Image (cartoon, coloured by chain):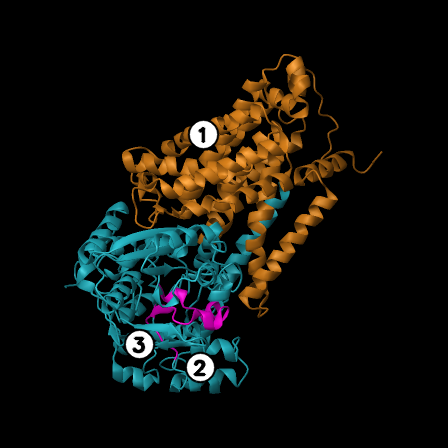
Amino acid sequence: MKNFAKLAAAAAVASITAGAALAEGLYTPNLAYRTGPFAATGIPLMNGQKDYIEMLNARDGGVGGVKIEFEECETGYSTQKGVECYEKTKGEAIVTQPWSTGITLQVLPKTNVDMIPILAPGYGFSPMMDGKTFQWAFNVPSGYWDGASMILQYLQGQGDLKGKKIAFLHLDHPYGKEPLPLLEANADTMGYELLPIPVGLKEMQNQSAQWLQIRRARPDYVVMWGWGAMNAGAITEAVKTKYPMENMIGVWWSGHDADLRLVGDKGKGYKSISWSFPELESQAMADIKKHVVDTGKTLSNEEEMQGVFYGRGVVMSMILAEGIKVAQEKYGVGEINAEQLRWGLENLNITEERLAELGMSGMVAPFSTSCSNHTGHSGGWMLEWDGTKFVKVSDHLSPDTSGYADLAATKAAEYAEANAPWPVNDSCGG
Amino acid sequence: MLYRTAGQFKTSYQADQALFPVRQDAVLLAVILAFAYVIFPLTASEFTFQTLLIPILIYSLAALGLNILTGFAGQLSLGTAAFMGVGAYACYKMITLMPWMNPILAILFSGVFSAGVGVAFGIPSLRIKGFYLAIATLAAQFFLVWLFEKWAWLYNYNASGAIQVPNLDIFGIYVAGPLASSITQYYVVLGIVTLLTVICINLTRGNLGRTWKATRDMDIAAELIGINLMKSKLTAFAVSSYIVGVAGALFVFMWRGAAEPNLFDIPLSFQILFIAIIGGLGSVMGNYLGAILIVGLPVLLNLVPETLGIPIKSATVEHLNIMIVGSLIVFFLIVEPHGLAQLWRLIREKLIIWPFPH
């Protein structure tokens, strides 16, 4: 028992000093996971994020002349570690990048109290698009409902969905269940039959039961919401059961080059909806090569940098940097605080011209946010694996947001009610 | 020196059987309680509350519950996390169905549900023992987590399948949910943990505790001297699951704020089992020592490089951390296979006879 007092006293001292050690430039921590079961998919994304910011620091001296301190706090995808990181960084941080649905769920209710914006590019709770209710959360440039809507649109483009059977292979976890309400709602209007097939966290690598079910049900399409080891498991099983690859479509997190490289040519035709695309010839990538890779500051490698995930990481950091820039211009200060960054993220306007200026044309579709729209609904492209890499196979697809605006509003209202008293930003119109 | 017992005479059996036969123990405990109740709350930062003080207390309580079953009554259980889940989901349902309910009462009452479930899964213990019983509790673990996932009523048909703690107040002070301050939550946790610890100490020293220990040491002999094994084993399951359930409710309501079913999966059960084993089976204090080692130490180790200004990548720190904590566990188990509590017991004995060892 003696040890307890000593340890706790040491903890108190350590935490005070830890808090004071920071504060230089703009502190934007990233709750990364380079360890644990999801590290393989996490690392390329985190490298992309980190390298873009390092490039900005080296090329422009940060954003608006202020250096960005982009620090990673390792979570290993564990919610407990994530909350630890959040508590550790929230004193100085101007943004939280929680990086897992579990951590997002934990941190989301605290944001109104701590007043730190959550930047969750392409993940998290879909109703977060309702900026009135979720004042501090941003899932730019596309949420999961956008993704599901785009996939359905693409499938409709391939032929009427009436009477078709769509299997929805998903991780049995908040993340995998996210698009279910939308897919269910559309099943009636579009006339397809939805067959949800959950994959438990423990069965990710052994999906023989699920694929047996798919073989028996013979769905016309398989839509997949997988992450980490589940993707590779599903793709190898699909190859093994000889499911026609061109009828299998994943969400953006299920389009990892390394997973497809495992099956190579046999994976030809596999598709993944994506709001980002790696333009290897773009100016931004060239600058990263010049300022970060050639100076040996990167943790990435040649092969990884050509992948979809690395490029997506770059886009994520671009969105953060743009948010900072918009806020700096509005408030006329370099060292903005969390509240000012919130305004910045809420008033993003990423146009085609701006993307060209940034040297990122084609890496993400143009989008803009507003105080009531925290997602932006950029839309995206259908990517297809050609045996060695992902290529665009569709024109730009825009989600049909009107189809689920009501659903989002209801879910947001439910959330606010369950967490009462929950402040709603009534001042913003539309 | 510090632990000199000279001059402390016992003149009655009662005094000899007292909780603190040596005065210094009582003083030490008073100092620790003073730290816990006064000094930590005054000095701790938000970070310390959220990552050290509150989780250590909650994990200690869960390990204490397991220790009643495994350490005192000798019934190995691998389903602790699932019973914590029962407590958490029961508390969530009570709070959402009856929002007027006092949250602290709801937390204390939620243990009753997990006690019921625990007894149901404890019934096989009347026929099977040891590893076979461990498999039966493992079944509870898998079944209950599956139930948390599939029974949508439990999480109020939330689309994401997770439970979220609403803002709850007692007389206008928020005790749970995002608006609650850490210090309030800390005091609630500390109060409940203290209460249950006192009850456990008394239970294990009393008639029931002796029955459990007899069952643990040799159940046939216990039966022969007239101990009702069914009663003994089932009360152990009930008391243990009650405490574990309360710990689960505290875990979600006073600390995490949200939970998804797989939070209560087997890694958490193992973590709590490790706390109980490393702390010392059959000891109350050991649970606290074990929780400090397993829950607190990694957090502290994470801070070391930053505090000393050593630039290491946070992923590397995490790898180092796992290695250091792992080797410490091995080290402590080699030095003292009976756990940290036994280590402290030996140190204390040495202090008492110091400087004249036999």
Drawn side of residue A47 relative to residue B347, left or right: left
Q: Amino acid at mark 2?
A: Met
Location of the N terminus of chain A by quadrant is top right
Location of the C terminus of chain A by quadrant is bottom left
Vertical position of residue A253 compared to residue B110: above or below: below
| Circle 2 chain | A
- Please check the rendered image and state whether residue A258 is part of the magenta-colored stretch, yes or no: yes
Confirm or deny contact between disc 3 and disc 2 (CB under 8 A): no
| Circle 3 chain | A
Which element carries disc 3, helix, strand or loop?
helix
Q: Position of residue A69 (x, y in %)?
A: 45, 73
Q: Residue at 38% of width from left, 85% of height from top? A: A282
The quarter holding residue A390 reads bottom left
Which chain appears orange?
B
Drawn side of residue A117 relative to residue B39, left or right: left
Q: Position of residue B26 (x, y in %)?
A: 61, 31
User: What's the CA distance linking mark 1 and mark 2?
Assistant: 57 Å
Vertical position of residue A408 compared to residue A69: above or below: above
Q: Amino acid at mark 3?
A: Gln
Q: Residues within 10 Å of mark 2 (few under 14, many from 20)?
A: many
Drawn side of residue B87 relative to residue A302, left or right: left
Which element carries disc 1, helix, strand or loop?
helix
Which chain appears cyan?
A
Whether residue A310 can be seen here: yes
What number is the disc on residue A328? 3
| Circle 1 chain | B
> What residue would you read off at disc 2?
A55
> What residue would you read off at disc 1?
B117
Q: Nearer the viewer, residue A36 or A398?
A: A398
Q: Which residues are magenta?
A: A249-278
- Please check the rendered image and state whether residue A283 is part of the magenta-colored stretch, yes or no: no
